[in-house]
Image: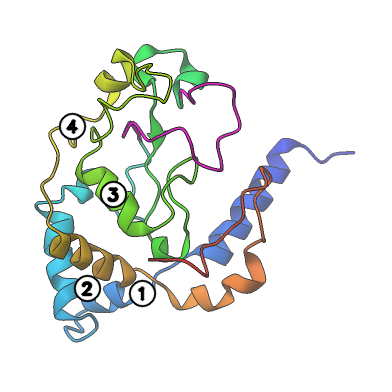
Amino acid sequence: SELSIIEVVNAIGHFEKVAFATRNAPWDDYLRGDRQAISASAKAGALVFFGKGKCATCHSGPLFSDFEFHSLAVRQIGPGKNISSDDLGRYHVTADEDDLYKFRTPPLRNVTLSAPYFHDGVAVTLRAAIRHHNDPLNLADSEFADGTHSWNIGKRKSVSYILAAGLNLTDTEINQLVTFLKTLEDDLADLMPEIVPVSVPSGLPVAALFNSE
């Protein structure tokens, strides 16, 4: 009878801290001085991540997230979409038009084990997610089968200024980024099959352990 939402949140938070804390990835070993902990391709990917790719602008800090909200104008057709119209993201909470289509920056540790990507799971692979970052306005001029336009002016304006102009990453640089992100996999990932459910409450299956490319 004394159990409240406070105890529930604290319990879940403690579980997540213990079960999903990651500090022993190859990238951590590299930062601690082991220069052989990651490959040359991963090092090149790190240079893209912290440089041309602008990834660290939002994916910053030890968990690789600023925990802020940004818009990438992600397509609203993924299997995780369960609403009758566009998911307006943070706007549903704040009712502030500046928050239209914004979603929180996800942490990137073990990101290679957490497919599918984006809030609605529309990106099946990590490369697909990176390609969308590379050119988030790539579908801005597309139309639905009935001829109506798929993007409204609000969605166009919402796209983060950091990415709106595109990144012009090459396929080689995208591959290097994926290689770098694999260095964020922690040994605790070996325990994931015992922790990760088959699906989330919406019914969307968790395919992370089987499809990371």
Q: Residue at x 42, y 66 (%)?
A: 212
Indicate which disc residue 31 carries. 2
**Marks 3/1: CA–CA distance:** 17 Å
Residue at (59, 22) in percent of width and height: 84
Cα separation between marks 2 and 1: 10 Å
* Residue 206 visible somewhere in the drawing: yes
Q: Earlier in the sequence, mark 3 or mark 1?
A: 1
Give the crowd class for mark 3: few <14, some 14-19, many >=20 residues within 10 Å.
many
**Circle nearer the N terminus (1, 4):** 1
The residue mark sitting in front, 1 or 4, is 4
Determine which residue is flagged by label 4: 164
Name the amino acid type tagged 4: Ala
Residue ID for mark 3: 59
Residue under numbered circle 1: 25
Earlier residue among tags 3 and 4 = 3
The quadrant of the rendering that contains the C terminus is: bottom left
Which of labels 3 and 4 is toward the front?
Answer: 4
Residue 198 placement, left or right of 40:
right
- Residue 176 location (% of width, % of height): 19, 67
